[in-house]
Image (tube, rainbow, N blue to C red):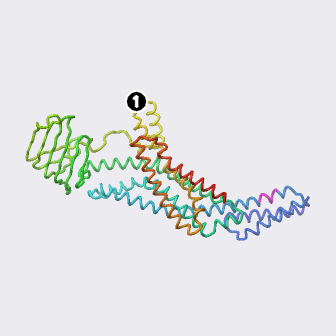
Amino acid sequence: MLSFGFSAYIKRIFSSIKYLGFKGILDSRVSNFRLLKWIFVFGFIIARKRSDHKYMCFFADRIYRMQAVKRFVMVRYIAKELFVYFFVCFLFFFVVFFVNQLLLMAETVLKKRVPVKYVLQLIVYCMPGVVSQSAPFATLVGFLMCLGRMVTDNEVLILRATGHRYGILLVPVLIMGMLISLFSFVMNDYFLPLGTLKFNRLYKSIIVSNPAVELESNSIKRLNDSTLIIGEVDKQHVSDLVFFDVKEAKDQRFIVSKDAVVKKSTHDGVLMELDMTSPVVLMMNKNTKRDFDVIISDELRLNVFEDSIIDTNQQIAPREMTSSDLKKKINRMKALTNVNSKQLNTYILEYNKKFSVPFGSIFFAILAFPLALVFGKKDGQTLGLIFGIIISVMYWAANILGQMFGLRSGYNGFWMMWGPNFFIGIVGFILYLRLRRK
C-alpha cells in the first residue's frame, strides 16, 4: 500500500489536475490533452503495481472520462458540420418552395390587385407549410454533402484509423435527424393547421370584398350546379360571358352576354352580381329538345350566391386539424355504421401524412449516412448534391402519387404515406450492412 504521506501528496496533485485539467478540457482551454492523459495512465500503472485499488479506480475513471470528452468533442464537431450543411440546404429548398407558393398566389391573388397587407398575411400563413416541406429534403441533401465532404477529405478514414467505429458518425446523424423531425412535426402538426385555417378565412373575406378575384380571363369557373365560361376580364368588366345552369334533372338554361359588369352585392348570401348587357337566354328540356324558349333583353342581373363558390360548411377540413383532433375524428367515424369509407380513408391519409412527412427526416438521415460513405470517396460533396436532388424529386413524386391513389382510388392511407419512408429506411439499412462488412 502507499504510505500516508505519498498518498496525501498524490491526492493533492491529482485533485489539482482534476480541477484545472477537466475544467480546462470542457472549456476548450487546455492544449496538451495528450500529456494529461499520459499522466493519468502513468498514475494508474503505479497504483496497479502497488495494488492500490482505490487509486486504480480513481485513475481508470479519469481515463474513461477523458475518452468520453474526446467522443463528445467528436460528436459535437460532426453535429455542427451537419447543422451547417442542413441550414444552407434548408435555405435553398425554402426559397424554391417559397417562390413556387408566390407563383401560385400570383395566379389567383396578386394579379387581381388585392391590397398588399392581405397578400403579406397570406404569405405568412403559407410559411409553416413551406418550412415543414423543406426540412426533410434539406436533411437528405445537407447530410449527403456533409458526410461526402468528410469522406473525400479523409476525415472518416482518420477516425477509423484511430480506432473509432462508425457509431461516432452515426450517433450525431441520428440525433440531428430526430431533432429536425421533431421541429418539422411541430410546424406540420400545429402551425400548419393554424396557418391553413387563417389562410382560408382571409381568402374568403377577400373574395367577399372583391368578387372579381374569382374571375380569370379566358377560363372556366365551375359552380355547384352551373358553369361560367369567361372571356376577357378587365377590372370589373367581363366580356363574352356564357352561363350554363341545370335547374332540375330535365331543365337546362343557357345565358350568353357580350359584356357584363361585376358588382359586390348588398344582399346577404349573394357573393356578386353580374349585370349583363343585351343577354340571350335559352331554356330547354332534355326530353323535348324541339321545344325551347328564347328570351332577349337589354339588361339582365344574375346573382351568384356565396355557397356556389365558397364552401359555407362549417366543418373543419382534415388539413386544418391537429393530429390529436384528427385521431378523435377518425375514432368517431369508425364508431358509425354508415360511414363513407372513402371519406374515412381521406382522414386516415391526412393523419398519417402529419407524421410521415416531418419524420421523413430521420429516414433520410438513415439513408444519407451509408450512401455518403459508400459513394463519397471521390468528390463526395458534389455527388451528395446530385444524389440528394434526384432522391428528393423521386420522394416528392412518390408522395404525390400516394396521395392521389389514396384519395381517388381509396388505397390504404397508412401505406400510401409511409411507404416511401419505409422503402428509404430499408435501402439505408442494407447499405449500412454493406458498409459494416467492408
Left or right relative to 46: residue 208: left
In the picture of the structure, the residue carrying the numbered disc 1 is 338
Q: Height in image: 248 above or below 405? A: above
| Left or right: 2 in relation to 375 | right
The residue at the point 89 percent across, 58 percent down is 51
Q: Nearer the viewer, residue 82 or 247?
A: 247
In the picture, measured across the screen, residue 111 lies left or right of residue 438, that is: left
Residue 336's spot in the image, x, y percent?
43, 30
Can residue 61 be found in the magenta stretch? yes
Identify which residue, 101 or 342, lies in the foreground.
342
Q: Quadrant of residue 428?
A: bottom right
Task: Choose top left, top right, bottom left or bottom right for residue 337.
Answer: top left
Rate crowding at label 1 as few (under 14), some (14 to 19) or many (20 or more) other CA atoms within 10 Å. few
What residue appears at the point 14 percent right and 49 percent down from the top-left corner? 257
Q: Is residue 82 above or below residue 186?
A: below
Element under disc 1: loop
Identity of the amino acid at label 1? Asn
The residue at the point 26 percent across, 56 percent down is: 112
Task: Find the magenta span and give its range.
Answer: 57-62
Q: Is residue 209 magenta?
A: no
